[in-house]
Amino acid sequence: MGDRAMCEIKTEGGSIFFYTHWCGYALPNVAEKALELAQPRIRDLSYATRIVIDYLIKEAGERDSETGSGIMLTPDAEDEYNDDRPSVTIDLLNNQMRTRR
């Protein structure tokens, strides 16, 4: 059971991947809002990345929890919407969000 999905976050140093076990259906909308919230710091990618990841975790309801979401450097989690590849990409370099579903 679950509603698993991943989001790729592209930065100048490479990609970071966010995984949610329970909120995959909402991930495109949450990612869009995360990119919007990062706009004031979009030219400072360390801050923009932190804002995006913080919002993704918050909206997954997984703050202070040891399960339910994760962050990784290699996309090695399940994504039931896109054959276990990230179904959402937040490209901070180009200030874009894409969904592959």
Image (cartoon, helix red, strand yellow):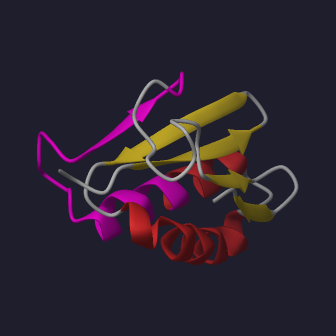
Q: Position of residue 63 (x, y in %)?
A: 20, 56
Q: Residue at x 73, y 53 (%)?
A: 44
Q: Is residue 98 left or right of residue 78?
A: right
Q: Is residue 34 left or right of residue 1?
A: right
Q: Residue furthest right?
A: 94
Q: Which residues are magenta?
A: 52-75
Q: Position of residue 92 (x, y in %)?
A: 75, 53
Q: Position of residue 42 (x, y in %)?
A: 75, 62
Q: Is residue 9 left or right of residue 96?
A: left
Tell me the quarter of the image containing the C terminus: bottom right
For residue 40, which quarter of the picture?
bottom right
Please tell me which residue lies in front, 54 or 16: 16
* Magenta region includes residue 54: yes
Q: Residue at x 83, y 49 (%)?
A: 93
Tally the marks.
0
Q: Position of residue 18 (x, y in %)?
A: 46, 44
Instruction: Look at the picture and state if 65 lies above or below 59.
Output: above
Instruction: Look at the picture and state if 72 lies above or below 82.
Output: above
Q: Is residue 54 left or right of residue 9?
A: left
Q: Residue at x 43, y 48 (%)?
A: 80
Please tell me which residue lies in front, 54 or 46: 54
* Magenta region includes residue 47: no
For residue 100, which quarter of the picture?
bottom right
